[in-house]
């Protein structure tokens, strides 16, 4: 981990290549594609050397969120801390803001994916969310 940012070697990000703006903007899209097993979550924690943690301290998160066409591949998953802030709750706000921009035509899907995968903290501050 690099603070709130994932290790780019463990989590470079990955997308569903077939995901389109039309698909991701359709209600229910993320429910249809979400599939991260408990075994995969354990592997994610192990990759980052986290052997135990209090409940609620982390969530296994998609670097490029499903709502922006991110995939469930392990290379797109990382253990994201709730604190210090900004943590996973704040990243959720960024994901929602980027999704709205993509679905309203203000931003391309690829630009949103790149912004969040490159440095989600910078994107969070750039959009004035923090």
Image (tube, rainbow, N blue to C red):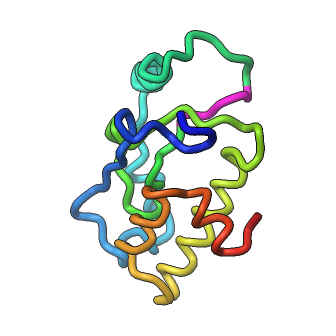
Q: Nearer the viewer, residue 17 or 45?
A: 45
**Residue occupying the far left of the picture:** 18
- Tell me how many marks there are: 0
Residue name at image x 22 percent, y 63 percent: 18
Where is 63 relative to 36, above or below?
Answer: below
Residue name at image x 44 percent, y 58 percent: 118
Q: Quadrant of residue 111?
A: bottom left
Rendering coords of residue 116 (x, y %): 49, 60
Q: Is residue 35 magenta?
A: no
Where is 107 relative to 19, above or below?
Answer: below
Rendering coords of residue 102 (x, y %): 47, 79
Residue name at image x 43 percent, y 61 percent: 29
Q: Is residue 106 left or right of residue 85?
A: left
Rendering coords of residue 101 (x, y %): 54, 81
**Residue occupying the far front of the picture:** 2
Q: Is residue 80 left or right of residue 46?
A: right
Where is 43 relative to 9, above or below?
Answer: above
Q: What residue range appears in magenta?
A: 56-60
Magenta segment's dominant SS is strand
Q: Is residue 17 left or right of residue 114?
A: left
**Residue occupying the far top of the picture:** 51
Rendering coords of residue 21 (x, y %): 37, 76
Q: Is residue 59 magenta?
A: yes
Q: Quadrant of residue 128?
A: bottom right
Q: Quadrant of the C terminus?
A: bottom right
Where is 67 relative to 39, above or below?
Answer: below
């Amino acid at each position: 981990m690099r603070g709130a940012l994932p290790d780019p070697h463990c989590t470079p990000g990955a997308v569903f290549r077939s995901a389109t703006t039309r698909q991701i903007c359709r209600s229910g899209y993320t429910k249809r594609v979400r599939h991260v097993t408990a075994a995969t979550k354990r592997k994610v924690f192990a990759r980052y050397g986290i052997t135990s943690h209090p409940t609620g301290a982390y969530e296994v998160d998609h670097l490029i969120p499903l709502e922006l066409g991110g995939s469930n591949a392990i290379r797109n998953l990382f253990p994201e801390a709730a604190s210090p802030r900004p943590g996973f709750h704040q990243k959720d706000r960024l994901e929602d803001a980027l999704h709205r921009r993509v679905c309203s035509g203000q931003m391309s899907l690829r630009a949103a994916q790149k912004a969040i995968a490159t440095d989600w903290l910078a994107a969070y501050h750039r959009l004035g969310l923090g």
